[in-house]
Image (cartoon, rainbow, N blue to C red):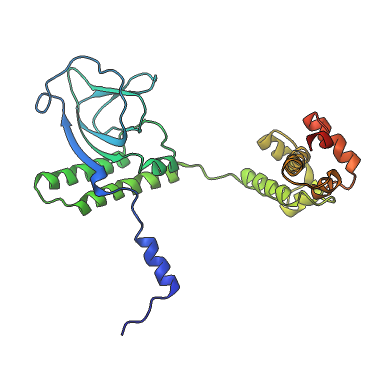
Amino acid sequence: MSKPLSERQQDFLLEVNPCLPFPAQKIKLWYDDFSGEFYPVQHHTYGKHMKNSFSLHYITEGEGKFAAEDEPLRRLGKGDLFFICDRQLIRYFPDEKKPWKYCGISFGAPEMTDFFNSIGWTSSRILFHDSLTDRIGTLIKETIEKKENGSVGQYDLLGCACQILSLLENHCANALPLPSATQLYVSRVKEYLETSYSDPDLRISRVADSVNLSHPYLCRIFKRMEGCSPEQYLLRHRLSVAKRLLSETTYSVGEVAFLCGYTDASQFSRMYKKHFGISPTKER
């Protein structure tokens, strides 16, 4: 009799068997040849058009031009790749003398919208020839060859699609700059202020001590990153919370002042009116 899976094992199985955001029939692969073999040679410029899918085009030979929206046309060649975003105006066409050939993969929309949003690909773009474009192109070409030989199944298509999405996800994650030490310090200070604003004895010198920085140095880097001093940031946050409490709760003005770190309701009212141009009483 088999033993029941532990909760940890069950969680792991769920993690490695995700519910894919797209069915196999939403994936399309193709190979296009504009030299005359598949299509007649066309020497005119294509107008702008829009697609209702996300697609990657890997150029295997020749040249052509591509542009999104009102951007200038860019010349592309062998090894380059262009991405077409769902419902965005684009224009692309083969070169007259050296018309391109490309292979491609498309994903149905809206199933894949969240994925491309998550990696920051919210508009069409170009990836110039490098190891990433070659790896994507190779995956597409190999799967197309299997398809032409009649040996491709839906799991081959899913495998190809998942590998490409994994490459894109890792590429975009690695492209993001790591936060600098200054950014980390400022982020920690902001978090401290936003969670301790109700303390009437809160002092910036104490916050500086909590991150092992001198008070003057903390103020310099904070203002450089945020455009205001830590004191100003704390004031704005307190008054922002106060405005929400006045409009969404039945607390009195004095209670709101106390909850936002003010021991003197009159001082709170003066600061509130100076910041918002209206008294807390009238706000209520």
Residue 274: x and y, percent? 83, 31
Residue located farthest toward the bottom when viewing the structure as drawn: 1
Looking at the image, which is closer to me, 180 or 163?
Answer: 163
Residue 6: x and y, percent? 42, 75
Looking at the image, which is closer to me, 18 or 212?
Answer: 18
Residue pictured at 22% horizontal, 43% vertical: 140
Vertical placement of residue 47 versus 194, above or below: above
In the picture, residue 122 is in which quadrant?
A: top left
- Work out which quarter of the rendered image holds the C terminus and state it: top right
Residue pictured at 82% horizontal, 37% vertical: 280
Residue pictured at 75% horizontal, 39% vertical: 243
- Work out which quarter of the rendered image holds the N terminus and state it: bottom left
Instruction: Say left or right for 106 vs 38.
Output: right
Vertical placement of residue 271 versus 93, above or below: below
Instruction: Say left or right for 26 vs 174.
Output: left
Vertical placement of residue 52 versus 186, above or below: above
- Counting the numbered discs, the total is 0
Residue 40: x and y, percent? 11, 21
Residue located farthest toward the front when viewing the structure as drawn: 250
Residue pictured at 51% horizontal, 42% vertical: 177
Instruction: Say left or right for 129 vs 178.
Output: left
Residue 237: x and y, percent? 73, 41
Looking at the image, which is closer to me, 19 or 176?
Answer: 19
Instruction: Say left or right for 80 vs 272.
Output: left
